[in-house]
Amino acid sequence: MRFYLGTHQPAWLARDLGMPLLVSHRRLAGRRGLPRATGPWALDSGGFTELSLYGRWRTDAAAYVSAVRRYAGEIGNLEWAAPRDWMTEEHVLARTGLSLRTHQHRTVTDYLRLRDLAPKLPIIPVLQGQSITGYHRCADLYEKHGVDLAALPLVGVGSVCRRQHTVEVERIVRALVERRYRLHAFGAKVLGLARYGDAITSSDSMAWSYQGRYRTGCGPSHRTESNCLRFACSWYWRVMDNARFEEPRVA
């Protein structure tokens, strides 16, 4: 499993860290200068924050494609980019005022739009839902529109990062793996990876930053560890060293 370290600091892309990074479009958009990546990285669309704050996407499809194309060219080493998907957490649905099924339809149609605008960019489809049935419904919607998800190198699984029940997420993941999808679990909990890390292709986490908010900074340049490179690297390698991908335990 490929494990991406999520970061708020685009400058880290230029550092030789020996680990893949996940950086949000919200942190890169509008920058006049961009770092040149020394290693592989992936682009998060920042959709959760966008929809939570504004209840809609303020960046249209053409502008997003233009941004991704710029990142791929100027930063380099971009492995894949998330689409402008629509998360399905309850508070996000309340913010947009739309139904879960509408969020799923918009997620699929936006991916199709992005693919039509830039078929050569490595933008991946993302599945959204709340239940196993819901995720299957979203997958079926892609297939109905001619997207062979099983033939793609990666398919994202969204709306799982804030779930407390890792057993539920494991059931969702393994149900989708049965469809022969190569999955990226967005923001999966580290404890969850011990249960289903063997089944997915990749995942990412910014848990180190949340933990770092409550720790005193290791130097005079920062009061907490929430954006500390040394703290982030230590956390990442500790997770990798402790990772034990076990046999399925879903009843």
Image (cartoon, rainbow, N blue to C red):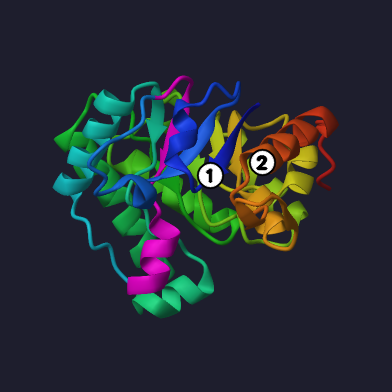
Q: Amino acid at mark 2?
A: Ala
Residue closest to the eye, 148 or 25:
25
The answer to whether residue 246 of the structure is visible from this angle is no
Q: Residues within 10 Å of mark 1 (few under 14, many from 20)?
A: many
Q: Residues within 10 Å of mark 2 (few under 14, many from 20)?
A: many
The answer to whether residue 106 of the structure is visible from this angle is yes
Q: Contact (CB < 8 A) between labels 1 and 2?
A: yes
Q: Residue 158 in the image: x percent, y percent?
A: 51, 51
The residue pinned by badge 1 equals 7
Taking the spot 49% from the left edge, 34% from the top edge, the residue there is 12
- 19 is higher (above) or lower (below) than 134: above
Magenta stretch holds residue 116: no
Q: Residue 119 in the image: x percent, y percent?
A: 21, 28
For numbered disc 1, what is the local secondary structure?
A: strand
> For this view, does 200 lie left or right of residue 50?
right
Taking the spot 33% from the left edge, 72% from the top edge, the residue there is 54
Which span of residues is magenta-colored? 37-54
> For this view, does 42 lie left or right of residue 208?
left
Instruction: Give the mark, 1 or 2, whose residue is nearer the N terminus.
Output: 1
Task: Give residue 232's mark.
Answer: 2
- 151 is higher (above) or lower (below) than 147: above
